[in-house]
Image: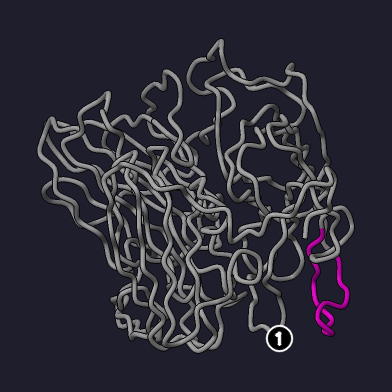
Amino acid sequence: MAPDISGAPATLVTQLVAPPEAAPVKRFALPAQLATIDLGKGKMVEAWTYNGISPGPELRVQQGDFVEVKLMNKDIIAGVTIHWHGVAVPNAMDGVAGVTQDAVQPGETFTYRFVAKDAGTYWYHSHQSSSMQVLRGLYGVLVVEPTSAPVHDDHDYTVDLHEWGTDPECFQNCAHVRTINGTAQNVQLAAQPGESVRLRVVNSGQDRHVLALIGAPVTVVALDGHDLNAPTPLDVTRLPIAAAQRYDLRFRMPETGVVQVLDADLEPKANDPRPAVFIGTGGSIPAQYPANAPLFDFTHYGAPDADALTANATFDAAYILELGNALGLYDGQLTMRFTINGQVNPYVPPIIVQPDQLVRIQINNPTDDLHPMHLHGHSFTVLTKNGQPLTGSPVILDTIAVEPGESYAIAFRADNPGLWMDHCHVLRHAAKGMSIMLVYPNIETPFDIGSASGNHPE
């Protein structure tokens, strides 16, 4: 519950819905159900899925569409929801069990309704026991196509990166099978010489991936669904993508040969086979991963925009989030706890905002872990990295990957009233405490978190 600051009557999160729109309606049905998934290479997993597949169905809509998605839980005993990651939905549609709704139990349904206001690459996933359910397959991609594309692409493909545990009882801190678009085998995508290709890369797992595109110069046209200003082609460059982040890449097919997308870690390991993407005709043997290629740095890429929000702006509110970890008791067990300002959820004091405030948040990570911090319901502008302002394009994200020893200053406009989570998207970190609430005044929830309610968002 948000504190009553103004004395105005409280608003329930269930009242924060999209008003009727005179817009095209796109309807989808997503049954949540158990299924056995063949990952290829002899790897079978017992998965939790949307529509019997994982990733779930790719949902494509146009900017301005009124989107209606009916979730039906067939047999997920723990309950299920859908969170629209990166989409500025009204609060009642955020899909967080115990905050904006109850988890949908077997035999029940819930219908999500929102306007696809912003074009871009997004994704959806369960926010009920998300540290287990997302890794077990309850996720998919949402693409919002622009009303008028400034550049024509001959092909528009999605590349989903995920990790699956081979032991059905182990989906945290255990051996993984890496997949691309749901398979551990190489992925082949069609394209002809001279054609323009857009790749929408989504990291739906928990590990950081470091991609390299071989065979053509590549332009990073968007991050987390938001276009970059005046991006330029890059020669062979490694592209780090943390959990929940997205890259939109564009390249033109060469006159001969194929284009490959390779996946590795910052320090590639021997005997660590991973699938690759082959675009074009021919080719099945991955190239040597360019371990010495430069890493992409968004803070110096593209060109500045005179109208962009900068660190010199006047902010109405400012917060500091100090990330931490330490051994301690959590839910009665001795474990590694992941903290914000020395506390674990639900004891972290919330970020409190007033409508239309410009809010600055400083995120410091003195730990030895990567923490991709995701803010629900809002996008934010990156102001500084390690105290230094960005010199390239404005960068607007919903998930910021804060490496060990790094700090970022971000800012956003408080323009979407509700109760919103801000948490680490290494979901096992969130499940062990690294989560904070962003609250607007006089908003209340009728839902509860805990064993009695059956709602467990993390």
Q: State whether residue 98 is above or below residue 303.
A: below
Q: State whether residue 424 is above or below residue 231.
A: below
Q: State whether residue 345 is above or below residue 7.
A: below
Foreground pick, 423 / 174: 423
- In the shown orientation, is residue 453 left or right of residue 289? right
| Residue under the image location 33 percent in, 69 percent down | 184
Quadrant assignment, res 53: bottom left
User: In which quadrant will I find the N terminus?
Assistant: bottom right
Task: Report helix, strand or loop for mark 1.
Answer: loop
- In the shown orientation, is residue 139 left or right of residue 353? left
Residue 295: x and y in percent read 52, 36
Quadrant assignment, res 28: bottom left
Foreground pick, 351 / 404: 351
- In the shown orientation, is residue 373 left or right of residue 29? right
Residue 60: x and y in percent read 28, 51
Residue 155: x and y in percent read 19, 41
The span picked out in magenta is 326-339
- Whether the magenta-drawn stretch holds residue 224 is answered as no
| Residue under the image location 36 percent in, 68 percent down | 70
Q: State whether residue 256 is above or below residue 343.
A: above
Residue extending farthest to the top is 306
| Residue under the image location 83 percent in, 42 percent down | 6
| Residue under the image location 27 percent in, 38 percent down | 198
Residue extending farthest to the front is 9
Foreground pick, 79 / 394: 79
Majority secondary structure of magenta residues = strand
User: In which quadrant will I find the C terminus?
Assistant: bottom right
User: Disc 1 marks which residue?
Assistant: 451
* Amino acid type, mark 1: Ser
